[in-house]
Amino acid sequence: MKFFLDTANLDEIKKVAAMGLLDGVTTNPSLIAREKGNFKDIILSICEVVPGPVNAEVVSLDAEGMIREGRDLAKLHPNIIVKIPMTKDGMVAVRKLANEKIRTNVTLIFSPSQALIAAKAGASYVSPFIGRLDDISHIGMELVEQIVAIYENYDFDTEVLAASLRHPVHVVEAALAGADIATVPAKVFDQLFLHPLTDIGIKNFLADWEKAKQTL
Ligand code: E4P
């Protein structure tokens, strides 16, 4: 499974990229709004440190506007993926951009039928939002399982990008469900490393080593 960071914060991105564990980045207008500077400059500086796809979202609601924004964003850098919301106009834009070899990620996916439509429209990625479904008492991860099964049934190339992941168990469940990618906030990425038994184990090994050193 590929790891993407769900952030527009360059410091967070640089830290994970330096570890060699970063496959890509997702941003959205809310994440961009937290940072200082101009949208395109932020996206470009992310592209300079990320060795894979960098998702940048359109804000137009009409197909024509989305296509225009999508073309503009795609021109910025070869790694740009144009994020487009799941609407009828959005799917018109996805098809048009796919015909022009511009890769898209259909975002705000909350049902398997939406994911099926996005794949048929030619999306390179779909983003089911797991945490937001959990928030309204639906089992978000079931959506990932359903999308993976549907895409396998019909051999769609569209990659399943599990989004809105809020904790490490979400990441593990997404991996078990067969998601191609998990996108996580930096805090969740850090949590993936942690286990108290690892810390205790290291502490005990070192204590034993210190004791043994006196007799070695
Ligand atoms: C994904 O592309 C979205 O940016 C993100 O995962 C949304 O997560 P949230 O529900 O925590 O805002």
Image (tube, grey):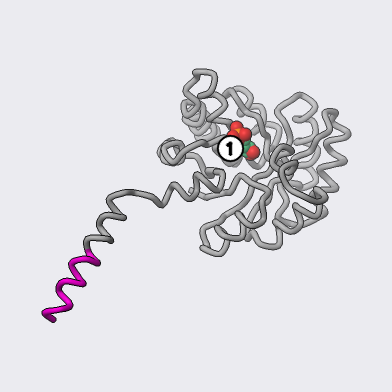
What residue does disc 1 label? 156
Q: Quadrant of ligand 1?
A: top right
Residue 126, visible in the rendered structure: no
Confirm or reject: label 1 Cβ below 8 Å from ligand 1.
no
Residue 99, visible in the rendered structure: yes
Q: Quadrant of residue 44?
A: bottom right
**Is residue 92 rendered magenta in the image?**
no
Location of residue 188 in the rendering, given as x and y in whole percent from the top left corner: 50, 44
Task: Tell me: residue 104, above or below residue 140.
Answer: below
Residue occupying image coordinates x 27% and y 50%: 197
The type of residue carrying mark 1 is Phe
Task: Tell me: residue 55, above or below residue 145.
Answer: below
Depth check: 150 or 83 in front?
Answer: 83
**Is residue 210 rendered magenta in the image?**
yes
Q: Main secondary structure of the magenta part?
A: helix
Q: Residues within 10 Å of mark 1 (few under 14, many from 20)?
A: some
Residue occupying image coordinates x 58% and y 31%: 129
**Magenta part of the chain:** 205-216
Task: Tell me: residue 27, above or below residue 132.
Answer: below
Secondary structure found at label 1: loop
Residue occupying image coordinates x 22% and y 60%: 204
Depth check: 76 or 112 in front?
Answer: 76
